[in-house]
Amino acid sequence: MDTGSHLLFGATLAGLAMLSPTVANDPQLAHAVLAATMIGSHAPDFDTIARVKGYAAYIRVHRGLTHSVPALFLWPLALSFTLSYAFAVSDHWVLLYGWSLAAVVFHVFLDACNAYGVQCLRPFNKRWHHWDILSLFDPFLFAIHAAGLVVWLNSGWNPGWMFAGVYGITFVYIAIRALYQRRVVSRVRRELSMEGICHVVPSLHWFRWQFVMETDGYFYTGTVRGKLVQVQDVYAKDEGNSIIQATLATDGVRAFLQFAQRIHVICKEQGDGFEVQWRDVRFWYNHQLPFGVDVKLDRELNVVSASLGWRKRAWDPPFV
């Protein structure tokens, strides 16, 4: 999810930790737990530092090793030892480890609920896991956690039971979204009457989704609004040619292919050469395919330039 939401959930996890009398009755330990949950809630996204080496490096790293099985345990280990000494609560490093672990695991879990997904089972496999349940920013989850935090900051009572209720609502809500997502996929398959792979991407609205259906020869994109399923665009699959093959050696294309799943390629002839556009159809918006890499070649099929990334405004869907 977005950085703001992760940090908010880190703060509310610290409130949940107040269920423990040990934490509630020791202000120094409570501050250490707050630091552990907030840093732990953001720690897997420290991989954004890879941006300094370019977007291709970022695509390779983001939501990969930092969200993997070993990282789930290494982040809390580093945090618990560091913070237990920084806050002079070394006798409680196991407790700090537990709450750091909860923060990191919850971060990875929420990212898996997104359409972008995570490589959470590395190093055992590099498959991307995405459940297509939640948008990058979920207004409902943000609202209930923010409301709980405001109540906590403006009251003098122990927030543990309040946040137990907030997290109970959170998991029930995610479960309901998961069930509804399955209904949306079934509805798309039923309305289109096609065999293939169906992805849906949630929006900020509970009952509005985007979908892409991949068949043997085509990609169908469209929207689901309540019970109404509408196809917006149809993209034919490209069988490939020597021009497309010439782009495979570029760093941007290799990084893109490592992540993308529903791949559409467009080859255009230009006055001084060619342009090959690689796109992931899952992330279409407004009849456009905004995520991918553009490679320009000369007439001898030498790569002139390559550009990888999003071609949309940050506030435009899809929110992944």
Image (spheres, rainbow, N blue to C red):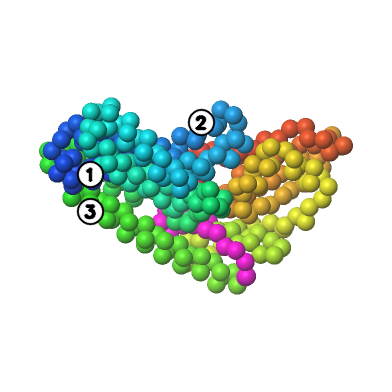
Provide residue 124's location: percent of width, then percent of height.
Answer: 53, 52
Residue 201 magenta: yes
Report which residue position mark 2 lands on. 49
Provide residue 177's location: percent of width, then percent of height.
Answer: 40, 59
Neighbours of disc 1 within 10 Å: few (<14), some (14-19), many (20+): many
Residue in front for this viewpoint, 24 or 159:
24
Q: Earlier in the sequence, mark 2 or mark 1?
A: 1
Please state the extent of the stretch shown in magenta in the rendering: 194-210
Visible residue check, residue 137: no
Residue shown at 28%/56% (left/top)?
169
Report which residue position mark 1 lands on. 17
Provide residue 253's location: percent of width, then percent of height.
Answer: 69, 42
Visible residue check, residue 123: yes
Q: Earlier in the sequence, mark 2 or mark 3?
A: 2
Q: Could you say whether the residue bearing mark 1 is in a helix, strand or loop? A: helix
Q: Quadrant of the N terminus?
A: top left
Q: Quadrant of residue 133?
A: bottom left
The answer to whether residue 134 is left or right of residue 283 is: left
Neighbours of disc 3 within 10 Å: few (<14), some (14-19), many (20+): few
Report which residue position mark 3 lands on. 165
Q: Quadrant of residue 97?
A: top left
Amino acid type of the residue tagged 3 in the rendering: Gly
Amino acid type of the residue tagged 1 in the rendering: Ala
The answer to whether residue 302 is left or right of residue 133 is: right
Q: Earlier in the sequence, mark 3 or mark 1?
A: 1
